[in-house]
Amino acid sequence: MIELREIRFSYPGHEVLAGIDLAVEEGELLLLAGPTGVGKSTLLGVLSGLVPEHTGGTLSGDVLLDGVSILGRPARDRAADIGYVGQNPAAWFVTDTVEEELAYGMEQLGLPAATMRRRVEETLDLLGIADLRHRDLRTLSGGEQQRVAIGSVLTMHPRVVVLDEPTSALDPTAAEDVLAILTRLVHDLGLSVVVAEHRLERVVPFADRMVLLQPDGTVLVDVPEAVMAHSPVAPPLVELGRAAGWSPLPLNVRDARRRARELRTRLDALAPAAEQRTAPGEPVLTARDVVVTQGRSAVLRGVDLCLLPGRVTALMGRNGAGKSTLLWALQGRLARASGQVRVTGADPHTLDGAERRRRTGMVPQTAADLLYLETVGAECADADADAGAPGRTRAVLDRLAPGIDDETHPRDLSEGQRLALAVAVVLAARPPVLLLDEPTRGLDYPGKLALAGLLRELCDAGHAVLVATHDVEFVAGVADTVAVLAEGEVVSDGPTLEVVVESPSFAPQVHKVLGSPWLRVDQVTAALATAGTA
Amino acid sequence: MAWWAWAAGLAAAASATTNPWLLALLAAVTWVVVQACRGDGSWARAFRLYLWLAAVTVVVRVLFRVLLGGVDGGHVLLRLPEVGLPEWTTGIRLLGPVTREALLAGLYDGMQLAVILLAFGAANALANPKRLLKSLPPALYEIGTAMVVAVSVLPQLADSARRVRHAQELRGSGRTGRRLARLRGLRRVLVPVLEDAFERSMALAAGMDARGYGRTGEASAAERRTTGALLLAGLLGTCVGVYGFLDTTTPRWLGLPMLALGAGCAVLALVSAGRRVGRSRYRPDRWQPEELLVVAGGLAAGAGLWWVADAAPRVAHPGVAGAPALDLAALLVPLTALLPVLVAPPAPTVATRQPAGPPAGRPRAHDVHEEVAQ
């Protein structure tokens, strides 16, 4: 139906796509994967017509829709056939309420009012958002916003829907909802769907075919099982399959469980290697019965939490459960209505800025907000000057993300590198407590692994770390304890393994397949290796 | 739409007078109406920004009067050393004696400007700028969208400034001289905020483009030329007409007739351009009696003060020599702009947007998508 022929795209001095041939068939779900910064969004932009018009750069090759070239047609003229949903739906909304947003595209197409009315109703029901119809778009949760964004292109009745990372900012349950809608579009309505994703573990089971975009700008297109065999980015299930030597690789938990019968019996006799941890000292941060209100409604209702040096705690929970609020309250900026927070013996809310920074370092959700200078070198020097320790920031940065040129502009860094820089800047003051808000957003598997390594290193150096995140697999990889927040209350709190066993939506894939006490692929491989040598 | 007309009425009222009492009354009326009628959208919070802007305007106006002096005679309050300027700048002088009259004139001028600003700020806070789009003729839609995007940037900027300021508290301020620190402080907030605003607008542009905004209808070159010519003639006619109307020394025929001709051309051009726009409207807003009353309130204040300016110039433009006079009629006029407090339809808020009554259960989603599928 849609065909890309010999697509080449380059920015001056840097080739992104090098001769891509790809055909999107009727009624298939095509998954686009690849490491960060490899050009996934660019390829989707070529499909929708936003590249190169909105990005610059030079494009050659041809895009065909039913055999007719549409390369010269701008995105606005393709909208009726190709619906595009961007990475951050909140920034894309043109109108104010759900209903108007759904109608917006149709208004542009000039459809008669009766048709618009009917399609809005149909779409509201299809996406299960009928009760949100008059709501202000900004007051919606992330998952709801994503569904509205999908709805706003569906009303135009496109034949292909293109989505750029539709679940990356969503909590596990909301992400499931969005994916269920996508599969429904493919199976019930016969639409074609093209999705780019980082967190493959969710999407791979639903994909009909998979496109792996490689760093050299070429693609590998095949059924997911075949592509996964070579993919540098792979979900834990696939890693497990590779470690166990299964072929074809399992893509969903059910297949893996059936395949794992033999592996489970072998592992029954083994246990994950005990991790070397120094005994925790006294808690460096304690929060008791913290209540924070915004206007008349309470965001946090009596939260208890304590952070030990040398331990990573993960903070999980729905979008809007109060995770960010809790972090800001612990940092001390946000005033509490009642309750107590002590960081190394003092209430951070009563301290001045510099003293607060010396006790608690925090990396906010948009790490770029911290950075304001033109070069990485200047950012480091600035942070050093503040901490009174020349070279310290750069040293941390080199450990996190080696090989960044001093002259680079922070905006030109990749998502992961920018995060590393922000962490380095915050750590320059050597705070005993480090708080991170959603640091895994936009990171691929190697990026997350590097971040996990960094957090472990900080722990070993005696820092206490609290990470707010949606990423189940990341939590399994890094956290010692997990606290789950809901409606402003801690609903479960304890060692990672215990919390994860309690709740199926927070369980990592390896645990779903092998059961307790296994959480990560590397535990399994290590155990098998020691059993093999013994 | 109604609110914009109401605000235009207020602005007209403000431009008709320099009487400080009347202006203060107008400002108070604006404030009361905004407090009573605004909703809970992010644009509604922008009014505070306009209040600040208005205050700054007044201060700047007065400072300029002090700096440039100008009025001779009157009660001298303070003697500042006069800065000598070269011969050729006759008529301009820097500093010099500060008179009460000059200060008051600056104050009145500034207040007039400030009230006009407040009127627009109020419209911005009360009316969702995006709703305005729905009432524009189709030919102006695209320009209108651009303007609405520009207007809605302000509250967004305020939001992202707050976020960045909080984030910046998380890192130190560097260790440079005290004097540089303030400048750097401004910069470290400004750089991320502007970058953020830029990225947002790029994203919005992409989002609108991807949903078909700006599709060109099928129009022949001839049609396009006709539209262009009509539009140009309309603009020209209107300009000449307005000039002729306002400047009494020009011949009579240049006034009203040209204005009418220009307006006629402009309307024709809009219709012609509108015909080739392939766009439709989903649930257009209809005018309700309440909205007409809101407009009437604003316009009555405007017309009333113009009438006062005509009938009692001493009240509308009091001299700076004595205390400004007032009369009852002039005092009552601005109060008519309070009408919306009584009649305006309730602003949409989170609470009122919730479906009334218990939700009627989700209608058979199953049947519906089968229908879509066909």
Image (spheres, coloured by chain):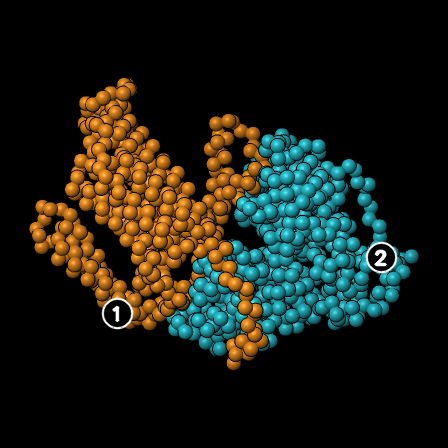
Question: Which x, y percent locates residue A209?
Answer: 63, 72
Q: Are marks 1 and 2 on the same chain?
A: no
Of residues B16 and A512, the one drawn nearer to the viewer in this rendering: B16
Q: Label 1, secondary structure: give it.
A: helix
Residue A196 appears anywhere in the view: yes
Residue under the point 87% across and 65% down: A265
Chain letter corresponding to the colour orange: B
- Amino acid at the residue labelled 2: Ala
- Amino acid at the residue labelled 1: Glu
Instruction: Give the number of callouts.
Output: 2
- Looking at the picture, does residue A156 appear above or below residue A467? below
Residue under the point 62% across and 35% down: A349
Residue at the spot of label 2? A527
Res. A530 image quadrant: bottom right
Characterize the local packing of mark 1: few (<14), some (14-19) or many (20 or more) Cα atoms within 10 angstroms: some
Q: Which mark is residue A218?
A: none
Question: Which x, y percent locates residue B264?
Answer: 19, 62
Please identify the quadrant where the C terminus of chain A is shown: bottom right
The residue lying furthest to the right in this view is A534
Judge from the rendering whether residue B333 lies leftward or rightward of residue A335; answer left or right.
left
Task: Please name the color used to draw chain A.
Answer: cyan
- Looking at the picture, does residue A155 appear above or below residue B185? below
Residue at the spot of label 1? B223
